[in-house]
Image (tube, rainbow, N blue to C red):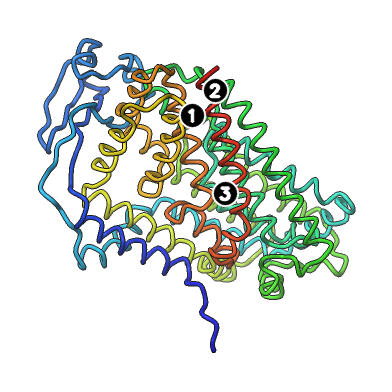
Amino acid sequence: MKKIKFPTAQTILIIIAGLVAILTWIIPSGKFDSLSYNKEANTFTKTSLGTSTTLVATQNTLDSLNIKIPLEKFTNGDIWKPISIPNTYKEVDNTPQGVFAFIQSPIKGIIEGADIIFLVLFIGGLIGIMNYTGAFDAGISWLATALKGKEYLLIILVTLLIAIGGTTFGLAEETIAFYPILIPIFLAAKYDAMVALASIYIGSSIGTMCSTTNPFSAIIASDAAGINWTTGLTGRFVMLILGTLICIIYIIRYAQRVKKDPSKSVIFDQKNDIERMFGSNTNSLIILTSRLRLILFIFIMCFIIMVYGVSQLDWWFIEMTAVFLVGSIIIGFIAKINEYTFVETFIKGASDLLGVAIIIGIARGITVLMDNGQISDTMLYYASNATNGMNKGLFINVMLYIYGGLSFFIPSSSGMAVLTMPIMSPLADGVGIGREFVVNAYQYGMGLFAFINPTGLILASLAIVKVGYDKWLKFVMPLVIILLVFTMLVLTVSVYL
């Protein structure tokens, strides 16, 4: 009998989109009123069932709406998105998403996700140019020699640096750029592609899960909860150190096992295909010439400039994409690639990541169905009511699972924060714990589920490596269970201290 293959990432997301569309027929539509700040006019805009009302921007206005957030959090730009207003949930006319809306959702998602999609395509173009110059092969040959016998340092360094990026400024979508670069290096170190995938993706996930100064989760969530972002920072920092240590040990143990016996790899049946796709010509000596060194320097500077721009200059996808485009052109000039060859190579490189771009669009389309079906607020309303009468230990663990579940439908950390924190954080007052614990439960719940969340970044990341979602689950689920038990223990102990 022919073996049934696990469906592709695109098919998985289409199935999920179909299930979400069905949910819009089952779950009642509902909305919380929202409040946004207008900086130019120094006023609030309250929106209720499509009707907008202008309110004076004062602390009294916030108090009257039962929003326990200092006014300066809005006026200084800490909260820049509309927030939900507590105790204002209303059921509205159902807006079920039919067959036509389901068919349109991937297209709408691609349009809405155009910014990150173009970033991915331009990264693909840059990778294509780099491969054409031969600089990758030369650099990897040099690195493989330099790390001889100390290959495990590669795992520690990559996982640690990306975790630092995740915890400080929310390094997540940007990691898409790292896979085509780092996978050949890990292969040259006699590891499998899963080790590279894990070091990058798990590094980003544990970093964002234990965000410290990340403005897109820790800071915006604390602001929306009405507390200073430094409240609870020590606990999150300790969680970051211990969580990252657990992840690194887990990856190294798997990597060493694969290095000793390649057949222990969960993707052993794809070994030859992946090595053909990503393997570099490291069997023969490739001299790292001055020109190739300069090309590698320009390439590395693209990422340094990107990280600096995102963390210090408020850059986002347009600016990041421009960096990779300019970098490609400069490398083309240094390598003396003629205009026709440059364009052809760039387009070919971009086309290699087209499948990834489509996955991002389909995943965004699921969010479109949720928004148009107006069921996100309904789930938030019932989730907030589920915690009534709980003791603090049970409460904080239920919050962990609620946030994990909600992140399937709302994978955006900043979107989750402004939607849920004004509703969820006051619940902490009722059970006698600080609101920072709700912020922690939000971060840990979203972060833990991000390891496997099909509506997040994992399917796009897997598509680059051509690894199936089922194989990723087989690899990562033991780690997720370890981290879940550890997180529940930390949360339970912390609320009683």
| Foreground tag (3 vs 2) | 2
Identify which residue, 144 or 483, lies in the foreground: 483
Residue shown at 67% from the left, 49% from the top: 199
Q: Is residue 91 above or below residue 453?
A: above
Which residue type does callout 2 highlight? Ser
> Which circle marks residue 494 in the picture?
2
Q: CA distance from mark 1 to mark 3?
A: 24 Å
Residue located beneath label 3 in the image:
175
Pick whichever of labels 2 and 1 is earlier in the sequence.
1
Identify which residue, 337 or 191, lies in the foreground: 191
Q: Residues within 10 Å of mark 1 (few under 14, many from 20)?
A: many
Residue shown at 64% from the left, 37% from the top: 243
| Foreground tag (2 vs 1) | 2
Q: Quadrant of the C terminus?
A: top right
Where in the figure is residue 46, as x and y percent of width and height? 17, 27
Q: Residues within 10 Å of mark 2 (few under 14, many from 20)?
A: some
Q: Is residue 231 left or right of residue 137?
A: left
> Which circle marks residue 440 in the picture?
1
Q: CA distance from mark 2 to mark 1?
A: 11 Å
Q: Residues within 10 Å of mark 3 (few under 14, many from 20)?
A: some
Q: Is residue 236 left or right of residue 7?
A: right
Q: Is residue 332 visible?
A: no
How many numbered dots are placed on residues in this image? 3
Q: CA distance from mark 3 to mark 2?
A: 32 Å
Secondary element at image label 1: helix
Which residue type does callout 3 highlight? Thr
